[in-house]
């Protein structure tokens, strides 16, 4: 049994996603979900109240882009963004606003736990498939623009 403090986590996603993630993370040793948020305006308040080590933000939160809150909370905790999209510039924008982890929503619980552990320790975690798709989409858009010049 480990004597280290568990990694405290805030989950910010729609209710169904939060339930699933909370249940899966409850089975992971050393990770404790301390707060949940369902809307963007609840994130900063939850971070201030619970002081999580890591915030897991759904990029497509109800009514707001999850990345919009990263600059507001990035000084207080590490951020992992969950997304299902590889929009042009999205990964670049995430890194620019201080996101330390970038992961697909369909990633297995073990991978999310690994990402949480890595960013809590000060590292970065980038889902290779999602990162590759994001960069390929960005390159395709750039090539299309050059073709129009």
Image: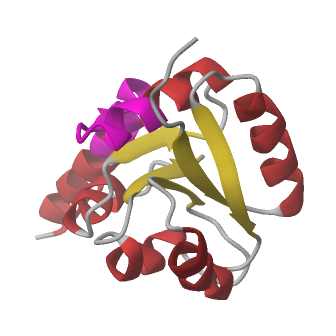
Residue 130 lies in the magenta-colored region: yes
The location of residue 141, given as percent across then percent down, is 29, 57
In the picture, measured across the screen, residue 87 lies left or right of residue 126, that is right
Location of residue 125 by image quarter: top left
Location of residue 46 by image quarter: bottom right
* Residue drawn at 84 percent across, 40 percent down: 20
User: Would residue 45 be seen by someone viewing this image from the given angle?
Assistant: yes
The location of residue 131, given as percent across then percent down, is 34, 37
Residue 64 lies in the magenta-colored region: no
* Residue drawn at 30 percent across, 39 percent down: 136
The location of residue 11, given as percent across then percent down, is 66, 56
In the picture, measured across the screen, residue 114 lies left or right of residue 29, that is left
Number of on-image labels: 0
For the N terminus, the quadrant is top right
For the C terminus, the quadrant is bottom left
Magenta-colored span: 116-135
Location of residue 28 by image quarter: top right
Q: Is residue 15 above or below residue 45?
A: above
Decide which of 48, 62 is in the foreground and name it: 48
Q: Main secondary structure of the magenta part?
A: helix
The location of residue 101, given as percent across then percent down, is 37, 44
* Residue drawn at 66 percent across, 25 percent down: 109
Q: Is residue 118 above or below residue 35?
A: above
In the picture, measured across the screen, residue 101 lies left or right of residue 55, that is left
Q: How is the image coloured?
A: secondary structure
User: Would residue 108 be seen by someone viewing this image from the given angle?
Assistant: no
In the picture, measured across the screen, residue 67 lies left or right of residue 28, that is left
* Residue drawn at 19 percent across, 67 percent down: 148
């Amino acid at each position: 049994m480990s004597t280290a403090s568990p990694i405290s986590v805030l989950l910010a996603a729609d209710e169904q996603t939060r339930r699933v993630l909370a249940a899966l993370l409850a089975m992971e040793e050393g990770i404790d979900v301390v707060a949940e948020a369902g809307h963007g305006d609840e994130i900063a308040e939850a971070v201030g109240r619970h002081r999580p080590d890591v915030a897991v933000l759904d990029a497509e939160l109800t009514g707001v882009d999850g990345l919009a809150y990263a600059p507001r909370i990035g000084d207080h905790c590490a951020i992992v963004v969950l997304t299902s999209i590889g929009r042009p510039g999205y990964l670049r924008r995430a890194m620019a606003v201080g996101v330390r982890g970038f992961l697909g929503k369909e990633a297995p619980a073990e991978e999310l736990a690994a990402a949480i552990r890595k960013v809590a320790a000060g590292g970065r975690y980038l889902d290779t498939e999602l990162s590759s798709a994001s960069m390929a989409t960005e390159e395709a858009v750039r090539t299309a623009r050059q073709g129009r010049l």
